[in-house]
Image: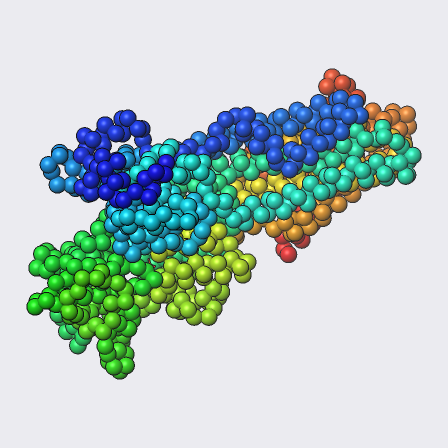
Amino acid sequence: MVSEGEAATSLQVLRRLDTGPRGLTEAEAAARLAGLGENTPPRPHTDSWPLRCARALRDPFTAVLLTLGLVSALVASWGTAVVILALVAVSCGLRAAGEHRADRSLAALRALVAGTATVLRRSGVDTEPRAREIPVAELVPGDVVRLGPGDLVPADVRLLRARGLTVHQAVLTGESAPVAKAAVDVPDRSEGGPFDEPYLCFQGSGVASGSATAVVVETGERTRFAAAQGGAAPREASAFDRSVHGISWVLVRFMLLTPPLVLMANAALRGRGLETLPFAVAVAVGLTPEMLPVIVTTCLARGAALLARAHRVVVRRLPALHDLGAVDVLCLDKTGTLTQDRPVVERALGPDGDDDPEVLRWAAVGAWWTLQLAELPAPDALDEALLTAAGPVGEEYDGIGAVPFAPERRTATAVVAGSLGTHVLVTKGAAEDVLDRCDLDPAERERLLALAAREADAGLRVLAVATARVPARTRPCTVADEHGLAFRGLVTFRDALAPGAAEALRGLAGLGITIRILTGDHPATAARACRDLGLGAVETGVAASEGAARVDGPVVVARCTPEDKARIVAGLRAAGHTVGFLGDGVNDIPALRAADVGIAPRTAVDLARETADVVLAEKDLGAIGHAVTAGRRSSANIASYLRVTLSSNLGNVIAMLSAGLLLPFLPMLPVQVLAQNLCFDAAQLAFAYDRPGPAALRRPTVLRPRAFLRFITGFGVLNAIADLATFGVLALALRGPDALDDQAVFHSAWFTENLLTQALVMLLLRGGSRRGPVGRAAAALAAVGLLLPPGPLGAALGMTGLPPAYHALLAAVLGLYALALRAVRARHDRR
Ligand SMILES: Nc1ncnc2c1ncn2[C@@H]1O[C@H](COP(=O)(O)OP(=O)(O)OP(=O)(O)O)[C@@H](O)[C@H]1O
């Protein structure tokens, strides 16, 4: 771990690592790799089976079931206790198996999006070092790496040189704002911990801005990140976690209240004592949706695996799939998402609007020397386009210093040696920001802004270029030097629209998703791109404008800084929307973090990819539509399961409690309640494999705990009325010694009726096709309901065959119940 080396000088650190500023030779690096092992991040510590099962036990429903099992064992109701334990074991086993499968496929998917690092290596001792990209796993201590905006720090490193470097260390320290880092040759011993040291950067952090050259000090298991168990910083609970949590806790309270209520009511009205406890416990168990965790894990894991296979979309955090289904506002950046981010220089023009090749030359000189002096691993797309268009330029001057581009400033500056002891500052950047740094009268400034806007209106990207001649000096160039400049002109670029973007945007609008474009670019360039993509009436707003964070605000918000983007996303979330953000640049990272679902293409900068919840393996906006549909499908299945289970469970419990008070005996034996519950659970696993109807996929799906609880109370009461009505009718119609006075007949009748109504509810409350896994499971449930009581298992459970007249009456009651369910459902859907 970085420890004794922390306070050493840079030279001492290089010596200790037996390396130099020119990096290692390939042979030396290979030998170190063989000796020390790969630089792979620590594996998440969730693999062992006992640990998985133990985690599954922490689920609130399982905890309640265990408590109920314990209570049964205490009153020596062994049958009940054993069935409850079996339920717990099955649910934990299924859940652990589901999670294991999900983790395995997620790990394989993550490998798809693994990153690389830029390292300086030499082929032999006397050869010049060459910067090349290698997989992060192949880095060894002593390697010299280059870091640029958006890079993940690939190991624990000591900075040798840095320019304007700031890094996000949230994963390690929880601090969300980027912190400034700088190379220090002879460090002071500081008060704070190693994370506060300016000259150290750690694996797991990411470069927010600036650039650096650094030597790798520790790799693999020996990094601070590994020591911190590689635990990602705890994330704010997602919309999905919050809804499931909310619903779970309301139910847990219900379940805990049920046994004492049953006991008290039976004691008060029927004078029964503690002998009703097993029944009370069984009723509470009947209320529990114990398969919820299994269904959730299976639905999400299946959805994610299908999505990866069919559309090459990688969901890095399972609950994000549900959140995708709930997204109702999708914010996109423009460059690289709607356009290809392969800009080509179109024109270079002077202040009067005429062609002027000098402007392009100065811009390219600036790009070349910023690239060289800031030691950036690679030029950005605009700089690359300048260098391609201008040809070799840098050699004519000596580079002195550079302040690399930062999206908050929107300018980049290089300083080169001029004639007769002077230096020339070359600044390029967004027109407004460069003009602010020029000596101009207001009218001239307005005229030049209009010139830039005219070019941008044609859909071109625009860079302004300005220079200043200053006396030569030795101190390094800083942002403060960018003033008093002379305006040189504009360079314009054409960046073609991404193929398929227009169609994908139409598809997303068809899914009921509002699109917002948040870009750092010129408002006119952005507006033109959006118009060409058919984004309806485009209103542009600058980031600072009021209302940018409202969903009915402007479609395009231009000149956003990274913080503006995050602020708008946070504002939309605060207004109750579920917000997705798709971006690929370093300027998108705060917004990716702020969104409910951060989405990045695989070609995004490493840090954006690492921050995102969802990674598109192909740069295809259309894949988002598929991902949203997959999310809606998984959520619809989870919601169907919850609706069906909870409303019929609640109905059964109400009916059973009322009947228990009206009848001279218990309406069902505890073991029968539990057997019925087991049958329900098995049938409902089918929801994990269901294909929901098209209606469920048309709108964003949100599990709103309040609406949910209203739904289940409504249908639960309807279910209870149907149960009680069945018995009312039966009691009237089938009098006599063989009929309902006989406890075994009553219990069997209740058992059959319950399973049949449950099957009906599965079919009618779900919506969509009656066929498929849910249809088959409902049919199987109905068959068990009819065939089990007269069979040997029925006899073992204290049940018996039913008189034929019962079945006829039951069919009539079920018919009526189905009609009522349909009517109530239709009314509910209309609301
Ligand atoms: N290398 C560069 N040198 C100087 N100025 C630059 C450079 N790159 C970008 N700019 C200027 O800064 C502005 C903002 O850039 P930024 O990277 O924040 O957003 P963007 O790439 O234009 O758009 P988006 O946010 O849609 O990805 C650009 O419009 C351009 O004017």
Q: Residue at x 43, y 41 (%)?
A: 316
Q: How many marks?
A: 0
Whether residue 379 is visible: no
Rendered location of residue 491, percent (x, y): 20, 66
Where, quadrant-wise, is the C terminus in this rendering? bottom right
Above or below residue 436? Residue 27 is above
| Image location (x, y in percent) of residue 296 | 56, 38
The answer, for residue 243, to whether it is visible in the render is: yes
**Looking at the image, which residue is at 26% across and 78% down?**
445
Q: Residue 343 or 478: which is nearer the viewer?
A: 478
Q: Of residues 824 and 4, which is closer to you in this image? A: 4
Q: Residue furthest top?
A: 792
Ligand 1 visible in quadrant: bottom left
Q: Residue furthest front?
A: 189
**Rendering quarter of residue 654:** top right
The residue sitting at 33% across, 44% down in the picture is: 7
Instruction: Locate residue 355: give its quadrant.
Output: bottom left
User: Residue 349: horizontal and vertical position, in percent?
Assistant: 16, 70
Nearer-the-camera pick, 660 or 404: 404
Q: Look at 69% across and 32% down and name the residue there.
A: 65
| Residue 547 appears left or right of 259 | left
In this rendering, the answer to whether 38 lies above or below 422 is: above
The answer to whether 77 appears left or right of 636 in the picture is right
Relative to 645, residue 461 above or below? below
Residue 109 placed where, x, y %? 39, 36
Q: Is residue 15 above or below residue 820?
A: above
Q: Quadrant of the N terminus?
A: top left
